[in-house]
Amino acid sequence: MARKRLEVTLTPDEHESLSTYVAHGHKSAREINRARILLLAHDGHTDADIATVLGVSHVTIYNMRKSIITKAISLSWMSYTMSPVGAVL
């Protein structure tokens, strides 16, 4: 019996932040893939489609879905690019 897929629902602000994060600047491939997984999952793509497009494992996708749904992670892993100009990190 197949497990029920975990649905990812992002707020408009989260969606915009992730889209901006992926589109601008230099970041690690791992962080960009995490953002892309969340964006594609939010858009309703299957895990198989996401895995094929991004070249990541199904386990990686499942873990990202689970983490964002249970709020075990926040979008703070990308916060350093979103901080205000002149902010001290």
Image (cartoon, rainbow, N blue to C red):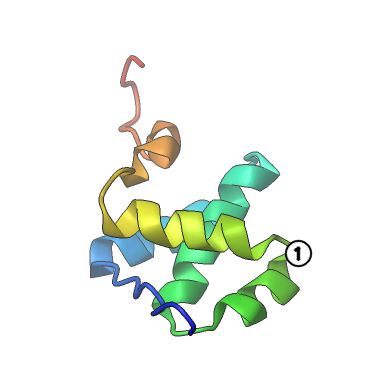
Can see residue 24?
no
The residue drawn where x is 42% and y is 62% is 65
Helix, strand, or loop for circle 1?
Answer: loop
Whether residue 39 sits left or right of residue 57 in the image: it is left
Query: Does residue 10 sit above or below 3 in this rendering?
Result: above
- What is the tally of numbered marks visible in this picture? 1
Nearest the viewer among 72 and 86 is: 72
Q: Which amino acid, mark 1? A: Gly
- Residue 73 in percent (x, y) is at 33, 43
In the displayed structure, would residue 17 be above or below residue 47? above
- Residue drawn 37% across the image and 72% down it: 6
One can see residue 82 in this view: yes
Q: Quadrant of residue 68?
A: bottom left
Of 34 and 57, nearer the camera is 57
Judged from this view, the residue extending furthest toward the front is 1
In the rendered image, the quadrant that contains the C terminus is top left
Q: Percent from the top left, x then y, of residue 64?
A: 46, 55
89 left or right of 1? left
Counting from the top left corner in percent of width and height, residue 87 is at 31, 21
- Residue 56: x percent and y percent? 70, 60
Identify residue for label 1. 55
Query: Does residue 15 sit above or below 44 in this rendering?
Result: above
Q: Is residue 36 left or right of residue 69?
A: right
Q: Residue at x 54, y 53 (%)?
A: 34
Mark 1 surroundings within 10 Å by alpha-carbon count, few (fewer than 14), some (14 through 19), many (20 or more): few
Q: Residue at point 30% right, 43% down? A: 72
Give the residue furthest to the top: 88
